[in-house]
Image (cartoon, grey):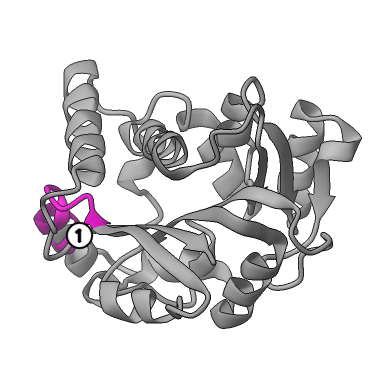
């Protein structure tokens, strides 16, 4: 991300429904599918500002990694030197079989060679460990917003599932998320001009709207019996065999 994107993220992520909801969904996935051992090892890859990882330090042994100078500066303000690692998802400076949990929250779309990142995560995870992954979904929503954020792609469910072979991975949960706001997002992206710089994620809605959007976002993501046919994002939880 650009420097101004980090500034925007720090400003809104504590309260905005999307960011707080995404962290809640990730915690649900870890609580539901993750190791039940005391203080499992959690590796947050592409940790950004470190907001999610900071919420997990009381219950997990946390390490954070990023390859952007702005992010590393923020991470070093929140974590001890031994917790902060400089590196990328496709080249992790970690030994084999070291993590119980890897989180990759809206990161894989920034990696040009995403298949190499999947292979690296498999190497770093312990057998039985889990990856919690979120990505933007559906190329129908591609716009200048993706280009500003340096995305290489958006994902569809079945191609994403296909990146995780049954020989190496067990799919625990895969689902389109943020389905309720899809029509509004589609309209906003279609009407967006290349020169537009403002994004809805930069503004926190009024309290009751913010709370409602967060509730719908989280509830639909963690509901396992309803296979949403589309969405603005995708949630995937896979276990290393």
* Position above or below: 131 against 190: above
Q: Compared to 80, does 139 lie above or below?
A: below
| Residue at image mark 1 | 231
Question: Is 15 situated left or right of 4 in this image?
Answer: left
Residue 102: x and y in percent read 60, 52
**In the picture provided, is 7 more to the left or to the right than 160?**
right
Q: Is residue 53 visible?
A: yes
Q: Position of residue 23 (x, y in %)?
A: 44, 36
Residue under the image location 31 percent in, 32 percent down: 17
The image shows residue 237 at horizontal and vertical percentages of 41, 56
Query: Which range is magenta?
Result: 176-186
Task: Tell me the quarter of the picture where residue 33 sits.
Answer: top left
Image quadrant where one finds the N terminus: bottom right
Quadrant in the picture for the C terminus: bottom right
Question: Seen in the image, is 39 located left or right of residue 132?
Answer: right
Relative to the observer, which residue lies in front, 150 or 197? 150
């Amino acid at each position: 991300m650009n420097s101004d994107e980090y500034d925007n993220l720090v400003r809104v992520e504590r309260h905005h429904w999307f960011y707080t909801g995404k962290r809640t969904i990730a915690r649900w996935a870890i609580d539901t599918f993750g190791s039940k051992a005391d203080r499992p090892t959690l590796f947050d890859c592409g940790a950004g500002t470190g907001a999610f990882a900071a919420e997990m330090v009381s219950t997990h042994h946390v390490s954070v990694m990023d390859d952007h100078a702005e992010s590393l500066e923020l991470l070093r303000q929140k974590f001890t030197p031994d917790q902060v690692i400089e590196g990328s998802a496709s080249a992790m400076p970690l030994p084999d079989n070291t993590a119980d949990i890897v989180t990759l929250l809206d990161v894989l779309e920034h990696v040009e060679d995403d298949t190499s990142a999947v292979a690296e995560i498999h190497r770093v995870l312990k057998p039985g460990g889990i990856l919690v992954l979120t990505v933007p979904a559906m190329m129908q929503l591609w716009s200048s917003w993706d280009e500003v954020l340096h995305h290489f792609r958006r994902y569809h469910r079945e191609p994403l599932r296909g990146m995780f072979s049954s020989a190496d991975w067990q799919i625990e949960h895969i689902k389109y998320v943020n389905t309720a706001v899809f029509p509004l997002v589609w309209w906003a992206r279609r009407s967006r001009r290349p020169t537009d710089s403002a994004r809805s994620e930069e503004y926190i809605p009024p309290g009751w709207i913010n709370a409602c959007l967060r509730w719908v976002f989280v509830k639909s993501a963690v509901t396992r019996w309803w296979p949403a046919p589309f969405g603005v994002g995708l949630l995937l939880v896979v276990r290393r065999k």
